[in-house]
Image: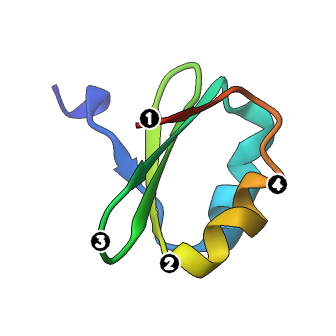
Amino acid sequence: NIFNMPKEIKSKEELIKLLPIALECRVKQSKDYVKIKLRTKHVLFTYKAKPEEVNEILSQVKCPIINL
């Protein structure tokens, strides 16, 4: 079902707008990037961030953060 698919966010500004409604934030480290997954009530949003900008984003997160 296409409605259950995760949605990829392309901009950091979009991600920051979604932070207040997020129920959970999962962080997955990779060699080249860090994937941030925001779970909201209906949709899972994903964002690929550079390792340098992750701390700045995670400092604004109010929901539980889970490292994968």
Q: Which residue is mark 1?
A: 44
SS at circle 1: strand
The residue sitting at 47% across, 61% down in the picture is: 9
Of pointers 3 and 4, the one earlier in the residue sequence: 3
Q: Residues under labels 1 and 2: Cα distance?
A: 20 Å
The residue sitting at 29% across, 71% down in the picture is: 31
Amino acid at the residue labelled 4: Ser
Amino acid at the residue labelled 2: Lys
Report if the CB atoms under discs 3 and 1 are less than 8 Å apart.
Answer: no
Toward the viewer: 29 or 44? 29
Q: Residues under labels 2 and 3: Cα distance?
A: 10 Å
User: Looking at the image, how many numbered discs can be counted on the residues?
Assistant: 4
Q: Which residue is mark 2?
A: 50
SS at circle 4: loop
Judge the density around disc 4: few (<14), some (14-19), many (≥20) Cα neighbours within 10 Å: few
Single out the mark in the foreground, 1 or 4.
Answer: 4
The residue sitting at 50% across, 78% down in the picture is: 50
Q: Which residue is mark 4?
A: 59
The residue sitting at 46% across, 31% down in the picture is: 43
